[in-house]
Structure formats: C-alpha cells, structure tokens
Image (cartoon, helix red, strand yellow):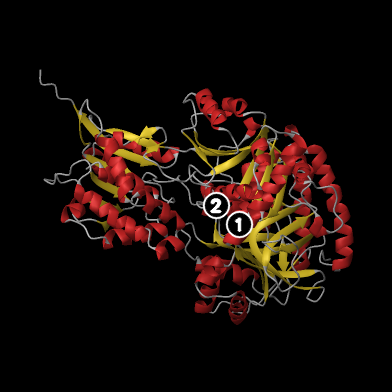
Amino acid sequence: MRFRFGVEGDLTTPSGDRLAVGDPRVVEFLSGLARRLLAPAVARRHPELGSLGYFLRPAELKRSVDRMTQRQDALVFPRGNVFHLPPANVDTIFVYSWAISALAGNHNVVRISSRSAGAAEVILEALRETPADPVIARTQRMVTYGYDDTVTAALSKWCDLRVIWGGDTAVDTIRKLPLRPSARDLTFPDRTSWAVLSVPGWRAADPAARRAAVVGFANDAYWFDQAACSSPRTVFLVGGRGTEAAELRAEFLQLLLDVVDRRGWTVDPAMAVEKRVNAYELAATGAATALDFPDNRVTAVTLAGAERAPRRWIGAGAFPFAEVDSLLGLAPAMNRQDQTVSHFGFTPAELGAFAVELGGRGVDRIVPFGSALTFGAIWDGYDLPGEFTRLTTLKVT
Amino acid sequence: MSVFTLSQASKEEQLVKELSALTEHHRARCEPYDRILSASGFTSASSIADLPWLPVRLFKTLELKCIPDDEVFKVLTSSGTTGDVSRIHLDKAAAAEQQRRLAATVQTVLGSKRLPMLLVDTKAMLKDRRSFSARGAGVLGMSTFGRDHVWALDHDGEVDLGAIRGFLDKHGDQPFLIFGFTFLVWLHLYEVALAHGLDLSNGILIHSGGWKKLIDQAVSPEEFRDRLRRVGLTRVHNYYGMVEQIGTIFLEGPNGGSLYCPDFADVVVRDPETWAELPPGEPGLLEVVSTLPTSYPGHVLLTEDLGVVHGIDDGDWPGKRFSVLGRLPRAEARGCSDTYRGAA
C-alpha cells in the first residue's frame, strides 16, 4: 500500500481525534489547498483544477458549512468514518467528495487509483505542500493499493459511510463486501448526460452568444474525453425540424471545430477508429441514419429518433443529434440513468416545466452550457453535506 | 505457379471491378452493412482506396454475414485478449475457396508437392480450448500443406530435441517445410539449432505472429533473417494475415524485407488524420482488401496495425510491397467508470 497523503499506519485503528462540522482546522487547510490550485501556473495546465479551486474558496466553504449547520430541529455532527472509492479517470472527483466529507468533520480514507495521473498527481502534491494542523494528516488519508479485497473489506467494516463512484460493475463488486450494520453506501454509478439546444433560442441569439454557448459546450464535452458522467453526448435540437435544424447543426459543428482548433485539442487515431466503430454500430442497428466524419476531432451522427440516443460512451468528440418538438416531448425518453441536461436558448419557464414534467424520474441536474462539469454539493440527487453528517435530536421537556 | 503476378495497374483495374461488385453483393444481402454504407453516403468507388472500409473490430461487436443461417458452414473466431472476439461466417463455397487460395499462395514458395513438415509448436496447444482459436487454427490451416508432421515441442512446451533430430535424419536431405510462430521459431528452433549444430539448410520456413516479443528482445526482422542464415536456413517467409480475411496472406518475398500482396488482395496505407491514402515511404494505418470474403462483408478492412508501403512494382514480385510496423495503441478514455475490479 502506498500512502499518498496523511500519516502512514493502520487505517482502521480507532482514533482519539475529534473534528467538528466546519472545523476551522479543516477550513484553513482547504482554503490553503484552494490557493495552490488557483495558482495561474496550475490552472493553465489543468483548467479543471481551476473549478476545483473555486469550489474550495473560503466563501464557498462557508456556504457549505452554513448549509450543514443551519437546521434548528437537530444538532449536526460528523457522520464518522467515511471510505471513498473515487473513479480512476476523472482526476478531480476524489477531491470534491473528500473535501465535503472533511468539511463535515469526518475521518476519511480515500482510495486513489493506481491509474491516476496528470491532474490527480498535481492535486496530491498540492495536498502535501499545503500547511496543515497535524490533526489533518492523522484523520485524512489517501492511499493507493491494487485490487485487494482484504483491504477494501477491512475499510468497509471500518466506515460508517462508503462512497462508491464509478461504473455499475464497480458498485456491484464493492457491494459484495459487507458494511457494519449501521453503515450505508452512497453510490454514484454509470450515468448519461445530454445537451438540449433550442432552435428558436439559437436563432434569436447574436453571433457572440452563439460562440459563447459553443465554447461552454466544447469545455463540457472535451475536458474529460466526453466520458465523465456529466459530459454531454447526444445533442437534442428542440423546436425546429428540417432545414432549420440542419442549418443550426451545421453552424454549431462549424463553431465547435473552430473552438477545438483554437484550443489545440486533438483526438488520437485510436480514438478516431473507436468513434468509427461506434458510429458504424449505430448505423448498422438502424439507430443512426447519417454519419459525418469531418475531422477526427468531431464525429456527427444523425439519430433515427430521440429514443435511439445511445446511453453508453461512444468516443471523445462524438455527437449524435436528434430533433424533438419540445422539451416536454423529450421527457419520456429520459430515465434514471440520466444525470445532467445542459441547455442553451430556453426560457426559464420552459426549463421549469421540463423539470416538473421529469418529476425526478430521471435527470438530476439541468444546467447551462459550460456548467455541465461544475461540481456541486448537491450531486446525483443527493445533498452531500446532509449525507456526510448525522443528526442528534434534543428535546428537553 | 504463382499468385503474385499482377502489376499494380492491372491489379487496380481488376480489383476495383471485383471489389465494387462484392460491395453491391454484400449490400444486397447484409442489411446492417447496407445501413452503414448508406449512412456514410457511399455510392461508388473508382479506385481501391475509394472503397468503403470497415474497422476490423466491427466483427467483434456486430454479426455481419451475407448468407442465411442455414448456409453457415463454419464460424471462425479470433482470439481476443479483452474477451471480445471476431465472428466470421463462412458458407461451404467461401470455406473451400479460402483454403484453395491459401494453398495457391504458399505453393508459390513451396511448390505443388506436399513436403515433410516440422511444426515449431506443441501438440498440447490444440487441446487447450482457451488458446486454441488463432494459434491452433493457424497451425491446423498450414499443416495441410505438409506431410509426415513432427512437433518440435513436447507437451510441456519444451524443445523435443529427439523429435527434431529424428525429423532431420529422415527428411533433412530433401526440401522440407518448417512452420511456426515467429517468436517460437526464434526461441525454440534457432537457438536450439545453433547450440546443437542442426542442419536446416533444406528447410523452407514460413512464420507469422507479430514482431513485438522479438523487438522487445531487440531482434529486428533483418537480424532474424541474418541469424537464421547462420544455421543454414535461407528460405524464410514471414506472412501477415488475420482471421477476418481468412485465406488471404501477405507473404514475404524470397529476398526478405517486404510483404507482397497476392493477385486477389491489396493493401492501402492511410493517413490516420485525413484517412487519405499515403504514398510509399509514409507509415500509416493499414487497410487490407481481398476478394475472398464472399459470405461476410470483410473484403475491405481497416486493421489496427500500422504499416508502410516500401515500393510498387519494384521488388521480388509485382505490386505493392510493405511492412507491418506494430499495433495502434488502444483508445482509452478518461471517465467516471471503472473504479474497482475484484481481485480475480
């Protein structure tokens, strides 16, 4: 086992250290970490760390603490021991999950994948360099170990809350290892996310607004190779069909290629082949009626209908398109697996009606283009500060 | 008799016609294939490079065949390290034709008589169901071109020096065939022949299976030939082929250094950014075309191998001569999935 952060030693030994919800020592440490992540040199190389740093700013931390402690009907305490199993490939998720839990005063063990690289290494380095009260290193630990069920089993018995990120298979595999009777799981399984684009809204937007929308969409799609849970995949063109929609799509793709060009993003040949394979599969099964490969970085797929939108990942820079008459008409095609819908060009009333129509049966986040990857304390339908704390009721008479 | 006869110009003329007809044949009989071509906007091709290629991996994820279920005579599978395997459907005619063409191809270097055959492999491998498909099929397919077969490795995969010596005593003074995977030949035949002074000078070696393991040991294809020459083995032919185009092999010429395309097949090297055909000398992704796949739409395939055309109509045999340079690394995405697998 490799200790990446925190004091080395047995992870499951009972600890005498006590942290409070919103403990000042944790707040100070997280603020210090934020400063490091927001340093221009870091943010330039890993833009996704910029949003992480923003999330950890003192003002944001205070807001989170306030939300945890605001209730009048109960006393709020840390949940206890929390064991996090974040995804291998989205470098920043482990920090969000851990940071909220640490802020809630929990003792945390985070399993960092051995496949972690790039941004994750930068974060771990920043963690180690940030000045901290010694209690931080004793209560907050990050480790890397192989697929070792005995370690995972011991930590599962140790924790009061086990946080499992990753695919359905990962969740199923880890769930086979029992928790203490009083403990429970918080799971973040496979998700799919979409983009919705209002045809009338696009037409009403001026060129600058259109470009800004595409810049936001491009970040959402390309930052994690379109494979993060929140990365938009299929684009639904809403409220305009035929030539109108076709013109919009052509303009959208042109702007997208332009943005990708300016950013210097590339898609390697293996990924381009992967996209071909997936696009051909969609065509072979009749889900797609037309395929366009203008460039390795952009693959455009015309779907036979909204209900044929693929829920699995089909490659970095692969965009199925489908036309629908209205957002309300799209609602029946959404299900529990669907997480984020990022939008452009709709009125607040349209979006509100869409959310109400969905009724919680699918889609946990509805956010504007450019915000799909912005992590929030409410995630996958869970109020994380609530999940990471426990409540004591006190009645005097 | 040779199947390496056509100049590139006559091959181009002939293959465009035949492969275009095959494309239409497959479109009419394989709906998924027709849908792919329609969705990509394909109408017709005026050159081999214009023909619509399928990524070879598609045969791992889709069932693509152009024959009704009751005419399926054989389903071939490739070995896959990740669990996905290609499934190639042959009818009786296609199965017979691929065997006939393979025979014609190897007879170019072996002659039409069946030769005594030394297999640089273990018979035990045929019984191992897990590793059988590719290696076993390769050995079995090739073994029909020989007679009086002797296995050079025993059941534990160890060199069976007695068996090799017995084979050479009996057949060593006449032409004989040696077949095996490149790495096994290097490890178990070359080194043993060197150590024990075996005389392989009447042997004709046909070998395949990729250079990766040898390159890891810093043995280049040139060095492989040079060193084999030291044990008397001068007639050495590497080949390249895949189950998805069964019956078609690209064979190394007598002077080595290049693979050649039989008259019914060709290669196109593509720029992996623009997908346009690259001129000789420029490496890219290798596409293989062949008129043999009549029962499934595998006549124009984009492989996941990198290759380079060295020259056209300027080598041992007419047409393109090329090399395979290695595999395109597999695409891996960043993403939320795949946190944890159980310890096997």
Percent across and percent down for residue A361 are: 48, 25
Which label is found at residue A222?
Answer: 2
How far, Cα to Cα, is label 1 from label 2?
9 Å
Between B4 and A264, the one lying in front of the other is A264
Q: Secondary structure at mark 1?
A: helix
From this view, report whether residue B312 is shown above or below residue B130: below
Q: Is residue B328 visible?
A: no
Please name the residue that numbered disc 1 is placed on: A260
Q: Quadrant of the C terminus of chain A?
A: top left
Discs 1 and 2 share one subunit: yes
The image quarter containing residue A280 is top right
| Lower sequence index among marks 1 and 2 | 2
Which label is found at residue A278?
Answer: none
Between B121 and A12, the one lying in front of the other is A12
What's the chain of the residue with tag 1? Answer: A
Q: Are marks 1 and 2 in contact (CB under 8 Å)?
A: yes
**Residue drawn at the location 82% of the way across and 66% of the way down:** B2
